Image: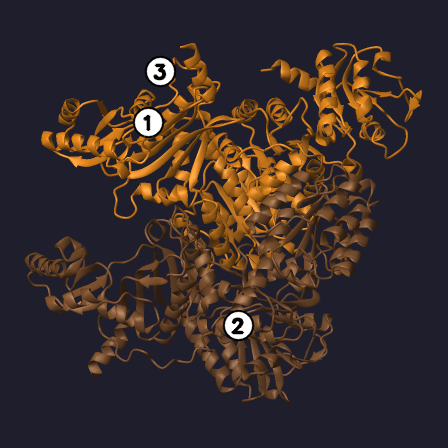
Chain colours: A orange, B brown
Amino acid sequence: MTTPSDASLSRLFNPGSIAVVGASATAGKIGAMPVSLLRQHGYDGRILPINPRADVIQGLPAAPDLSALDGDVDLVILAVPAAHAAQALERARPGQVGGAVVFTSGFSETGASGVHMQEQLCAIARERGIRLLGPNCLGFMNVRRNVYATFSPAPANGAVAAGGIGMVSQSGAFGAYAYCMARDRGLGLSHWISTGNEADIDVADCIEWLARDADTRVIMAYMEGCRDGAKLRRALAAARDAGKPVVVTKIGRTQAGAQAAASHTAALAGDDAVYDALFRQYGALRARTIEEFFNLGYALDTWKQRPQGKRLGIFTISGGVGALMADDAEDAGLSLPEPDALAQARLLERVPFAGPRNPIDVTGQVVSEPGLLLATADDMLADGRYDALAVFLAAAGSSDTLWPTFETFAREMRSHHPNVPLAICALFPPDRRRELERLGTLVFVDPSAAIRTIGAVANLADKNVAGQTAADPSDAAPAATSITKIFDTYNEVQAMEVLRLAGIPVPDCTLATDADTAVAAAARASGPVVLKVVSPDILHKSDVGGVKLNLHGEDAVRRGHAAILDSVRSHCPDARIDGVLVAPMAPKGVECIVGVHGDPVFGPVVMFGLGGVFVEVLKDVSFRLAPFDRTQAMAMIREIKGYALLQGARGTPPCDIGALADALAALSQFAHAHRDDFSSIEINPLLALPEGQGALALDAVLIPNAARACGRSASS
Amino acid sequence: MTTPSDASLSRLFNPGSIAVVGASATAGKIGAMPVSLLRQHGYDGRILPINPRADVIQGLPAAPDLSALDGDVDLVILAVPAAHAAQALERARPGQVGGAVVFTSGFSETGASGVHMQEQLCAIARERGIRLLGPNCLGFMNVRRNVYATFSPAPANGAVAAGGIGMVSQSGAFGAYAYCMARDRGLGLSHWISTGNEADIDVADCIEWLARDADTRVIMAYMEGCRDGAKLRRALAAARDAGKPVVVTKIGRTQAGAQAAASHTAALAGDDAVYDALFRQYGALRARTIEEFFNLGYALDTWKQRPQGKRLGIFTISGGVGALMADDAEDAGLSLPEPDALAQARLLERVPFAGPRNPIDVTGQVVSEPGLLLATADDMLADGRYDALAVFLAAAGSSDTLWPTFETFAREMRSHHPNVPLAICALFPPDRRRELERLGTLVFVDPSAAIRTIGAVANLADKNVAGQTAADPSDAAPAATSITKIFDTYNEVQAMEVLRLAGIPVPDCTLATDADTAVAAAARASGPVVLKVVSPDILHKSDVGGVKLNLHGEDAVRRGHAAILDSVRSHCPDARIDGVLVAPMAPKGVECIVGVHGDPVFGPVVMFGLGGVFVEVLKDVSFRLAPFDRTQAMAMIREIKGYALLQGARGTPPCDIGALADALAALSQFAHAHRDDFSSIEINPLLALPEGQGALALDAVLIPNAARACGRSASS
C-alpha cells in the first residue's frame, strides 16, 4: 500500500534526476563530494550541477539556478551556506522538485535566528510541495541505485556492500561511523539516511518508508528523541506488520545520558522509560551499545531464518567455555534442553569422555576426528528440539587443516537443518569468516556476544506474537464515552465509580450521609465492614479518627459511624464532610500500584509496580503506552523484579495474574479513550487476590486535566 | 621474598634444561611439537629428547629414559600415553628433576581408574621432589625465555609478543583461544600456563608465582573452581600486595552455568556468590565474558598509569554519541564533572556551537581545525579534575589526512598529562591502532566498551585501598577464644550472650525463671518491656500466647508473666520451659539480616541483606569471606540494591551505617576465630538504628558444628 507520504519519500530516496545546488569542481568541497561520488559509483540518473559562476562542473553542464532547468527534478541537494539555502529553493517552480537534501548547518541547532531561517526554508519547501531532509544532515545513500546524496567522506574510503539493511540515523557522526562499521564488518545496506535537524522528514518517517521498501529486510535506527509519538508508533507498527525487525539505539537511558542528550538536542528528550516501553511494545530491539546495535543488525541480516523460540543448543570443544556460554544463555533468557537419550548415547559411543548434555562438549577429539562436528550436530538436531545452535571451536578455528571441515559443516548444516540458525565462535581470518557468513552462519570472536545476540533475536519470536495482538491506538476508536461528566475533583467514592465504569473491579462501596444508610450498606455486605470519612479537606483520615476497621453488626456500625463524625468534627471543625464510606473489609492479597500519566509525546502511559519498597525504594516498575491488550499487560507484569511475589513467594498463594492483567488492559483502554480528560490516575492499592479470585482496586486518585475540567465547568 | 614453593615453580617455569619424554620426529605428533617449537623460537637452554626407540630426534641426541641422562633436568615434558607416564617419571633420581609437565589425558577426567593413575603419578613425583603441571593440560610457555613446553598448535601459527601479562588457564581450550586473541589484539605476555587437572600446581599457585615474577605486571586467570580456598586467598593477597591487578574469569555465575560447570569438572564448583565476594574482597576484576577479560587485560597492560579515581572526561565530535557514552559512564559508576568555567569559555570562543560541558562536543569542526583536539583537551585537564579521558572521533579516525593530528594528539597527551590515561574510540587501521597503543593510548571501536573498561579499572583505585586495609585470615591470630564452651544448642538468651561476647550490640536481656526476677529485670529497663517464653520445644511463640509486648510497670509485667506461662502450658503441656525472657522494647529501625555459613572451600562466609522481601523475594544480599574489616563491611552494605532504605528512604531517618559495619566486621572476626565451632549463625533482625544510635541484634540462631559439639559433649 502506498500512501502519499510514501510516494513523495520514494521520489526523494529513489530519484531519477539529481540537481546539486552549490556544485563545485574543487575536490573536498562540500558541493564537490556528491557530484564526484555519484559519478564514481555509476549513478544512472541525470546529474544536474547548479552554479551561477560556472558553465561546466566536473565535466557536466551546469545551470545557474533551479528555474533555469528545463524539466522536473526528483531531488535537489542544497550544498550552499544557510543564508542562501532558502533563496536557492525559492527558484523552484511548484511541483518541479520532489525533495531536497539540505547539508547546510547553521539552522535550528545554532539558536533563535537559526530556528527562524529553518522555518523560512520549510515554508518555501511546503509551498512548492518539496519534502525536506535535514538541514544540518549528512544526506543519504541509496546503495543499490548508487545514489550518493551525501558529503560524508566515508564512502570515498570504500563503499559498503549492497544488502538488506536500511539504516537511518538522526546524528550524522553516528551515521558515518555506523557506515564505516557496516563496511568493515561486511554488512550489506539498502539505504543509509541521516536526518539531522528533522525540519520535515524524521527518523519515524524513514522507518515507515523502509518498512515498505522492497529492498529492505532489516531496519537499523539511531535516534535522540521524537516529537511526534503517534507517527513513531505508526512507523514501528508498519515495520512489525511487514515482518521487518527494527534495531534501535536511543540515547539518554540514564540520568547522566538524558542530561547530556537534553543539552545536545536543546530540548527535553522525554522520559526514557517511555521509549523503552514503546520499543518493547512494538517488538523493536533496543541496543544499548554500538557493538550490540551491529551484532543485532548482523544477525538479522545474515540469518536467512530467525530462531522461532528460545531453546538453544550449545556445542563446544571445551567444557569450561560451554559453562561460560550456559551462564550467558541464562542471562539472555534462553533455555538449554538436553538432547534426547539416543543422541547422548551416540555421542558417548563416539567420544566416551564427552559431555553429552547441553552444553555438549565433544572435547578436543574433534581436531583428530573432524567428522564428529556434523555427526554430533545432526544427532542433536534430529528431533527438532532446538531453535538455534551455537558452536565454540576454540583455537581450532585458526587451523588451515581444519578449515575444509568447518566450511563443509556450515554448508551441510544449512541443507540438513535450514530452520536452525547457526552461530560459530572462533577466530577465523576475514575471508573465511565472510565465506561462512555467505552460507548464512554467524561468526563471533566472543561466545558471550553470540549468545546475547541469539537471545535478543529469539525474543522477536515472542514479541511479534505479542505485537500482533497489541491494540494500536489507531485501532481503538474513540469509544462511546462511559463517563459523561468530568469533575474538577473526585472524592474516593466518585473515583471508584469511574474505575468501575472503566471495567476495573472495585469493592461495593456506599457513601452514607447518615447512620441508617451506613447500617443498611453494612447489612448488604456479607462480612465485616470498614468505615471511612469522606472529605475534600482531610488527607490523613486515620490521624483524625476518621477510619474504623472490621466492624460486625448494626450496633458496631452505628457506634463507629458516630465515633468517626465526633472525632473528625472535634479535630477538624471546619472540614466539609461528604459522608462516611462503607465498604467490605478487603480480602488478603498482594498490594500493587498502577498509575497513568500523560506523556507529552506519547500520550497516556501506564505504570505497574508492587506496593511498599518495590515502587518507593527500588523503583521496580514497568511501563506501556496506552492502549494495550492483555498480552502486553501480562508482559509488563512479568517484567518487574518482584514478580516472584505475585507467583506466591513468602508462603502466600499465587495471585490471579490474569485478572491483574485484565485490570491493567482495561485501565489502558480507558486512559486512551479519555486521554484529554485526565492528567493522571493512580490506583493504590490494586489488590492482586489469590488465583481465581480476581483483583480489586481499593483506592484511587484521579486528577482531571485542568484545561478540560475548567472548560467544562465554565460551560456548565 | 622467595618461598620454597616459589623456588620450585621458578625452576619449572624458567628451566635451564628441558627433557621431552616421548619426543618424536614426526611433525604434528604431540611429542614432536615442543621440540620443534623450542628450537624454532630459539630456546637457549638444553633440549634433551627422550625416546627409547631413536638415537637422534630432530637432529638432537636422544636418551632412552631419564635415568640415562648425566645430570639434572629442570623440566621434564611427559608426552607419552597415560599408562606410561608414571613409569617414565619413575626413572628419575630424587632431586634430578625440578618439575614435570604432563600433557597426557586419560587421568582423573575420565573416571575412577584415571583418578587412581593420577594418584600414582603424584606419589612418584612427590617421592622425587618433582612439581607437576597437569596432567591433561596444554603445558606452558615462558614467552621471554622462549620456553615452549606445550603441544598447542597456537604458537605455530604465530607467536604472541613478549610483554607484561601473565596468563593462566585451567582449561587448555580457553587458554589456547586466549593465546590467539592476545596475539591478534597485540597483547604482550610474560607467561602462558594451562593447569589442566591440577594434580599438584593449580591456578592459585600460578597467580602467587606470577605475583612475584619480575616480568609480570598484570595477571589474567581463567578458573572453573578451586579446592584450596586459603591458597587462593593467599595468592590474590600476594598479587594485591605486589600491586599487580588480577583479571579473572570464573565459570558458573548462573544456575545453568553452575550446572554445566559441575558436570564438566565432575565436582560441585562451589557457591559462585562466594567466589564473587572473594574477588571483590581482594580487588580482583571479574570478567563475565572473554571480550571483557581481554579489554581489562588490554587496558591494564597498555596504560602506563591507571586512573586514580572515577572522574571521567568525555570529549567527542558528536553530541549524540557523547550522550550514549554518558549513559555508559553512569552504568559504570563513573562521574562526569563539568570542566571549569574558563575551559568552557575558551571552547565556546573557538567553536560557538560546541557542547562545553562534559561530555564535551567539539562538533565536526575538528575535521577542518584539527588543533582543536589538543587545545580542548589541554583546557579540560588543566586543573586536574579528571582521572581519565575518553575521546570519540567517529569516522574521522579512518581519515588519512587527519592521522598525523591524531598521532600528535596521543603523543602530546602523554607528555602534557601523563597521569590522565587516555582511550580513543575510532576505526583505525591495525598499524595505526598499534602505534597509538605504543604511546600508551587505548583504542576501541565501541565507545561503550571503552567506558566499561575505564570504569572497571578505575574501581581498582578504590578496591586496593579497601584491600590493603582488609583483614586477611593469616593476620587474624586464632584469638583468645572469648567463649569457652560450645553447647549442643543455644536458646535465644544464650545466643544473644554469644553475640555480646563477639562485640555485637544486643539488648539487655534477662532470662527470668520466676515472676519476681521478671519484675526486677523490667524495673532495670528504662522503658516498656517485652516478655517471651524461652523453650527448646516451642518454635512459634506468638501462636501459643508466648509473647507479650509493650508492658509498663510491675503489675503489667507480673500479669504478663503469668499469662504467658498459663497460655503456653495449656497449649503445649509437654514443652520444657527454660524461663521467660525480659527485654526492653526494641526501638524503631531498619531490619537487616546477617548470616554466616561455612563454605567447604573458603570457610565462614558472611551474608548481609535487608529484612522482608529484600532477602526472601529479591535475593538482594551481599557476601564477604570472614574475617574482614570495617571498610569491607561498608562496601558490602553499599552493594545491596536496597541500600537507599538505609540512607533514609520512605520518610525514615538515615541509619547508623557505621555501627552496622562494625557489627558485621565483629561478626566476621568472631566467625573466623570460631570457624570450627559453628556451622551457621543468623542474626535476624539486626536492627539498623538512626544515625548515631548504633545497631542492635534482636534475635539470633546459632547452630554449632555437629562434630565439634558432639566431641565436646562426649568428652565432658
Quadrant housing the C terminus of chain A: top left
SS of the residue under disc 2: helix
SS of the residue under disc 1: loop
User: Mark 1 is on which residue type?
Assistant: Pro
Nearer the observer, disc 1 or disc 2?
A: 1
* Marks 1 & 2, CB-CB < 8 Å contact: no
The quarter of the displayed image where residue B261 is located: bottom left
The quarter of the displayed image where residue A71 is located: top right
Q: Chain of mark 1?
A: A
In the picture, the disc for residue A482 is 3
Q: Chain of mark 2?
A: B
In the picture, the disc for residue B237 is 2
In the picture, the disc for residue A536 is 1
Label 1 – label 2 distance at C-alpha: 65 Å
Question: Where B226 falls versus A699 (above or below)?
Answer: below
User: Mark 3 is on which residue type?
Assistant: Ser
Residue under disc 1 on the same chain as residue under disc 2: no
Label 3 – label 2 distance at C-alpha: 70 Å
Residue A331 left/right relative to A513: right
